[in-house]
Image (cartoon, rainbow, N blue to C red):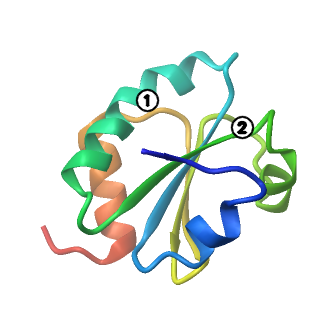
Amino acid sequence: MLTVTDATFTEAVLRADRPVLVDFWAQWCPPCHMIAPVLEEIAVERADSLLVCKLNSDENPLTARTYQIMSLPTLLLFRDGQPIRSIVGARPKGRLLAELDEALGVRL
């Protein structure tokens, strides 16, 4: 998983050549730590078709504010530089994958 910051967000996420899932998280957030292993698995399993990134909202307030992140964890799915789905809160892996596939138009 790639760590992004306010300084690297545009290049890493908005200019990516594939869909990007950004995990907005904070160190103090227990659900953020719960979902982290799930996101790591998805990053490995979908490495050829999806980039998974983490952005610490406390350390990078500009990007969090730009995308109006109000709760953590929030996952934003980007395609072609645009957010196409927001997922707030931790999810089991199967449910999260189903939501991502639906947003990306993947047939199961």
Mark 2 is surrounded, within 10 Å at the Cα level, by few (under 14), some (14 to 19) or many (20 or more) other residues, namely few
For this view, does 27 lie left or right of residue 19? Answer: right
**To which quarter of the image does residue 100 belong?**
bottom left
Which percent across, then down, holds residue 80? Answer: 52, 83
For this view, does 75 lie left or right of residue 41? Answer: right
Quarter holding the N terminus is top left
Residue flagged by tag 1: what amino acid is it?
Ile
| Mark 2 or mark 1, earlier in chain | 1
Q: Which residue lies furthest to the bottom in this view?
A: 80
Which percent across, then down, holds residue 17? Answer: 43, 80
Could you say which is closer to the camera, residue 25 or residue 11? Answer: 11
Q: Which residue lies furthest to the left in this view?
A: 108
Residue flagged by tag 2: what amino acid is it?
Ser
Q: Report the residue at 38% width, 39% height from top.
A: 39
Could you tell me which secondary element the residue under label 1 belongs to? helix
Q: Report the residue at 80% width, 36% height from top.
A: 59
Which label was assigned to residue 101?
none
Residues at marks 2 and 1, CA–CA distance in whole angstroms = 14 Å
For this view, does 2 lie left or right of residue 97? Answer: right
Quarter holding the C terminus is bottom left
Which label was assigned to residue 35?
1
Q: Report the residue at 35% width, 46% height from top.
A: 96
**To which quarter of the image does residue 7 belong?**
bottom right
Q: Report the residue at 80% width, 33% height from top.
A: 58
**To which quarter of the image does residue 68 belong?**
bottom right
Which label was assigned to residue 71?
2
